[in-house]
């Protein structure tokens, strides 16, 4: 192991190791993108690893998941003050207000050599006075939506990505630099496979299951199509229907009454399951078990086509999408602008699936680099290598050629 040196003092970790905090300052879904990497890095002995989570329930979830991996020498802690957590409980939210949480932890975070995060809001820590840590961006979904091409990514010291599709676009957009990024695969697959029960099924029968997975973004399909779609499936008996929006959809106070109404309206229907944000909605239980995907702009489409299956995309805003890179995933299934008969539209997507099967396989391979060691191992090795180069005062090379069989892809 190479010795570490810093230009602003030596790392404070045991044995001179760099100290890194994996910070999860949001709902449970973000935890899935980094917890296995944190465990792999801790087990490698290359860093002193801390995991800080802004939710007591999510903290317990993370500890259980790491235990299922066989354990790791991680220092777990809850991010944020007790008053902030009481505020979250009073508001019925899964996590306290993000910026208030960040403000409360600045002095603590500034003790670390690096902070690894699967989102961009926490970059505000820099403005708040956390000037010591290097900031590492953990991949958070691998979709095509424009919001994922966030200009703030360029402000990170190191960026991890799932595959060549992401790297090519980030490079074109000027979000990554030579030697300051790595393609490592998709650690969420490992976390989700560990978290969910492979024998669990959402329904007691074996009817084909349709998953409706709308995004919470304004460009999604929920406002226009959700009620007509659910009502249509409630009236038929050929399909089961899972309604599992993005977990942030109903974490907002403004939508909670609507969520309660939905649950009451369709209660007692054995072929309708509405999930407003349970563990099943983040551990890929639904994308793993459903037979047909109905959605709009969520990156979960790429998790669904891990096994190619029929897809139906709802163009609720009549977007001119055919040549728009932000809607490239709509080339993987049937697209409709109107939904006069939701059940018939699903049946048509099933009938038309053979025309899209190969495109799904190709796009999945472009999106996720799954060759070599597990993604969490590759991500941990990439982070460790970046920290070694950063704190040894070595010049970051234009390209780093990994050792044989490492499974890492650095540089450009």
Image (spheres, helix red, strand yellow):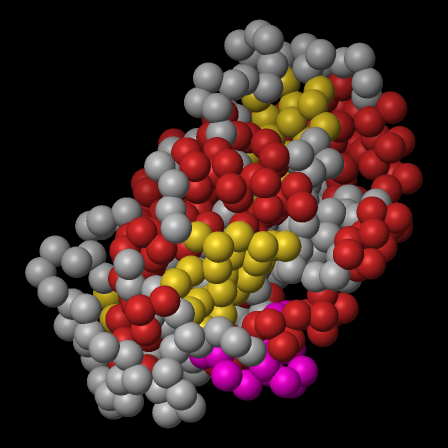
Whether residue 121 is visible, yes or no, is yes
Residue interval drawn in magenta: 121-135
Against 282, residue 98 (above or below) is below
The image shows residue 194 at horizontal and vertical percentages of: 42, 34
Residue shown at the point (39%, 50%) measured from the top left = 73
User: Residue 123 colored magenta?
Assistant: yes
Residue shown at the point (20%, 50%) measured from the top left = 372
Q: In which quarter of the image is the N terminus?
A: bottom left
The image shows residue 17 at horizontal and vertical percentages of: 33, 70
Which is nearer the eye, 75 or 239? 75
Q: In this view, does 303 lie to the left or right of 399?
A: right
Which is nearer the eye, 135 or 186? 135
Q: Is residue 346 left or right of residue 306?
A: right
The image shows residue 34 at horizontal and vertical percentages of: 46, 54
Whether residue 143 is visible, yes or no, is no
User: Residue 387 colored magenta?
Assistant: no
Q: In this view, does 27 lie to the left or right of 171?
A: right
Residue shown at the point (31%, 69%) measured from the top left = 15
């Amino acid at each position: 192991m190479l010795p570490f040196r810093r230009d602003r003092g030596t790392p404070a970790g045991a044995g001179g190791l760099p100290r890194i905090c994996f910070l999860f300052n949001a709902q449970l879904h973000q935890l899935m993108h980094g917890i296995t990497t944190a465990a792999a890095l801790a087990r490698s002995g290359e860093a002193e690893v801390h995991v800080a989570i802004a939710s007591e329930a999510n903290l317990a979830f993370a500890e259980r998941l790491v235990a299922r991996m066989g354990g790791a020498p991680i220092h777990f802690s809850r991010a944020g003050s007790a008053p902030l957590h009481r505020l979250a409980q009073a508001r019925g939210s899964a996590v306290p207000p993000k910026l208030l949480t960040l403000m409360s932890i600045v002095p603590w975070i500034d003790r670390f050599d690096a902070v690894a995060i699967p989102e961009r809001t926490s970059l505000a820590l820099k403005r708040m006075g956390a000037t010591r840590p290097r900031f590492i961006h953990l991949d958070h979904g691998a979709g095509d939506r424009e919001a994922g091409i966030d200009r703030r990514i360029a402000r990170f010291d190191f960026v991890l990505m799932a595959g060549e599709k992401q790297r090519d676009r980030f490079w074109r957009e000027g979000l990554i630099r030579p030697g300051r990024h790595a393609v490592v695969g998709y650690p969420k697959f490992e976390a989700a496979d560990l978290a969910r029960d492979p024998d669990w099924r959402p329904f007691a029968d074996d009817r084909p299951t349709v998953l409706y997975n709308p995004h919470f973004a304004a460009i999604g399909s929920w406002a226009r199509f959700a009620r007509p779609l659910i009502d249509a499936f409630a009236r038929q008996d050929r399909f089961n229907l899972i309604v599992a929006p993005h977990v942030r959809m109903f974490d907002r106070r403004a939508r909670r009454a609507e969520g309660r109404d939905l649950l009451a309206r369709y209660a007692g229907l054995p072929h309708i399951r509405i999930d407003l944000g349970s563990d099943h909605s983040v551990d890929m239980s639904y994308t793993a078990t459903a037979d047909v995907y109905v959605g709009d702009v969520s990156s979960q489409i790429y998790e669904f086509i891990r096994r190619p299956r029929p897809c139906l995309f709802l163009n609720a805003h009549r977007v001119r999408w055919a040549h728009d890179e932000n809607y490239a995933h709509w080339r993987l299934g049937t697209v409709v602008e109107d939904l006069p008969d939701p059940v018939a539209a699903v049946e048509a997507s099933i009938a038309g699936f053979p025309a899209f099967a190969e495109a799904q396989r190709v796009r999945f391979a472009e999106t996720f680099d799954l060759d070599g060691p597990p993604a969490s191992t590759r991500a941990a090795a990439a982070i460790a290598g970046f920290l070694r180069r950063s704190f040894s005062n070595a010049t970051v090379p234009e390209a780093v050629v990994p050792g044989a069989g490492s499974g890492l892809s650095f540089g450009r």
